[in-house]
Image (cartoon, grey):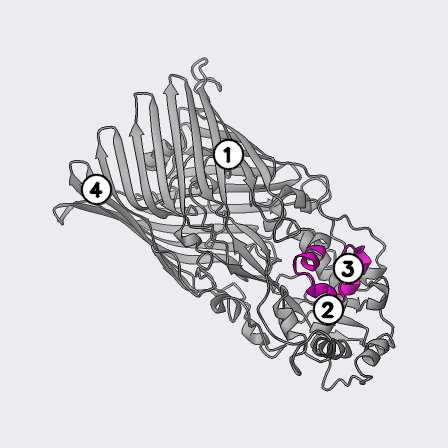
Amino acid sequence: MKTLNGLGAAIAAGCMSCSTAFAQSEGNFDFMGGSLSFNGLVRLEAAINTSDQANRFNQYGDPANGVAIRRAAGNPATQYRTTLVPTGLNPLTDLLGGFTPVVLGDSPRGVSNSSVVADTFTRYVPAKDPDLNYHLLRVEVSPTLDWGSGWSFQSRFRAVYDPGKLGYNDFSYGNYDDVNGGIEGGEPSQYHGRPNFLGYRTDDERNPLLFERSGKNYMIDAPAFFLQWTNGNVTARLGNQSVAWGQLLFFRIMDQANGLDLRRHLFLDRALEEYADERQSAPGLRVTWQATDRITADFFAQQFIPTIVPNTNTPYNVVDTHFTLHDNYTDGGYNEKFNFGVRFKGEYGNMSWQAMYTNKLDQLGRIRFRPSGVNKKLPESNELSLVLNRYCEAVLGSALGQGCGPQLAQLPFEVAPAGLHSAEEWFWGAPNQKLDPVGIFNGIIEDFAPLPELLTLTRDGDVNQISNQLNLLFMASEGLRGHIERDYFREDVFGLGAGYVMEGEPGSILDQLIINVEAAYTPDRLLTSPDVRRNPPDVDDLQVGMVAEKYQRFSDSFPATYLVFQYLWSKETDLAGLRIDGYGGEQYSTQNQGIRLDKDVPLSDNPRSFRNGGGGVNHANYVVFAFLQPTDAYIWEYSAAALIDVQGGILVQPAIQWKPQGNITVNLFYNYINDSVWGNNANRNTLSLIDYANELCIRLGYQF
């Protein structure tokens, strides 16, 4: 585990606040010719939702739930500049042989006030708020086997269990199998039933991590499992391990070796633990060499393991539930790739420096649209779908009875329940995820050409033209899911850092103040584009951070207080790895719980303007303040951390720790998130992605 200058000393001295700090075992045992010792932890963890809202990227938190939205289908004959009139389908039916569409059965679910070419749709998924955002049981054991002469084996085994259901209001896709035949595409454990809380599966249905086995409600892994050899100035580790470089809370400028595992509690654990529970481990070799009294060299070579994002409809999901994400980690052969890195660090009295180079696959990866592969025709529940299915069979070559199924299989769309149903949702949802709704639509038409044009879709239209096309598709399909994929691309990261320990009058605020500056430059990064294009241009990214930290004694009655201040400037990306040029896009529609979804006015009649893509945010800027104050004997510990996005968002985390006995720890901390502290556009800051996660977090731990 990485240790901050000074902070790690306090933790090791007795506070043991982070999940990987354990009490020492009381005895050693002879085993396999060596001395075996172990320690461990049993802990209950929970986060109580205090926001009265659900994650809006999930089905129950979708702001369109229960909202009546007026839709009007566009007219292809006018390049969708106008909407269809009741007789607007006649020319097309004449072209197809003069048949008269006949609709049998009831209206599609959620549809009312229908006049064939216009209707009102009310999303049929109910709105529900969870009582709990997070709860699980954790057990960890850390055996160490020491043979002497510099040889040892070190390990940490972790098992977590999340029962689900309790307090979560779990959504199940199985409840909607009677709508459009249910969902067919995607990895079954994620998209064909209740949420998969802890499992990591790729599209070939493999559990791809060598040191992990996981399922919907459990995960068992070995974050540490390596053989260590120390001989004088050289230490080598072979096996599953993490490499932690850098010295910043929240920020990961030099910390490039490993991705993060965000399935359990996103990154909302105690900030002072500095990603200790989230940082991924990977099989590989690490060698540290004390080259001189002042210079240390550190090298690693590890299997590439990506950042694992929460699964759909789990409490901290970050990928919109209307999209099926295909992870190409194994299909693309990325599990056979390796990351490499080297760092040199020097200490010269009060001054220090470091230089780092890492050659790696970007752990977050790049997301882009892909063909759905789902051959399912339009449902033929309305005249629009009947005409389009007949058009695909008569003009585009589909076999009789297949309708537009073969065409949709080649496009990133699947006819499915609980998907997107209106242009209103499209133009609200994309900016909410820092994406460009106009660019996405135009990009799909161009990237999947010529099929979209054959389906009469047209690019480079204004907002009204695009909304008319979208509503035609959504009305004919009774709802569409998008299909996206994640691929990983190699990049070079160059890092530099410098530090200085100030000297002043003993006891003054400047005396022993440690200042570190870090910078990382990554040329030619292949990131997810705000228009989610398949081949967007690369960018040159630069991050610069500064940290000032020290221990300051304010009273003889208490141990010294740890204080830290940090600042980060990022050229192209935010803390979540999203492109900054997707920030600031306006949400076109209005009303509903502060999220602007208009209940009465169709999008084509809405007079407000829409800004294409991002607006006015050129760089990301973040500020962090934190302190840690233990009491005498470390029975109580008080701390707080604040992350400020200068575009108007803030995360504040006050915390209390109580150790009534040496082996029992009680942690209580609160995550307060506000994405609109100042300014009038929450889409301009990172914290708008998790503003639902105001929560009271509790940990009850026993160490042995």
Residue position for label 4: 152
**Residue 123 on image: x %, y %:** 69, 69
User: Residue 516 versus residue 648: which sits nearer the camera?
Assistant: 516
Residue position for label 3: 466
Disc number placed over residue 626 in the picture, else none: 1
Considering only order in the chain, which callout, 1 or 4, is on the residue closer to the N terminus?
4
Residue at the spot 47% in from the left edge and 50% down from the top edge:
307
The label nearer to you, 4 versus 3, is 3
| Membership of 604 in magenta stretch | no
**Could you tell me the amino acid type at mark 1?**
Ala
Query: Marks 2 and 1: CB-CB under 8 Å?
Result: no
Considering only order in the chain, which callout, 2 or 3, is on the residue closer to the N terminus?
3
**Could you tell me the amino acid type at mark 4?**
Ser
C-alpha gap between disc 4 and disc 3: 64 Å
Residue at the spot 43% in from the left edge and 55% down from the top edge:
333
**Could you tell me the amino acid type at mark 3?**
Ile
Magenta segment boundaries in residue numbering: 442-469
C-alpha gap between disc 2 and disc 1: 50 Å
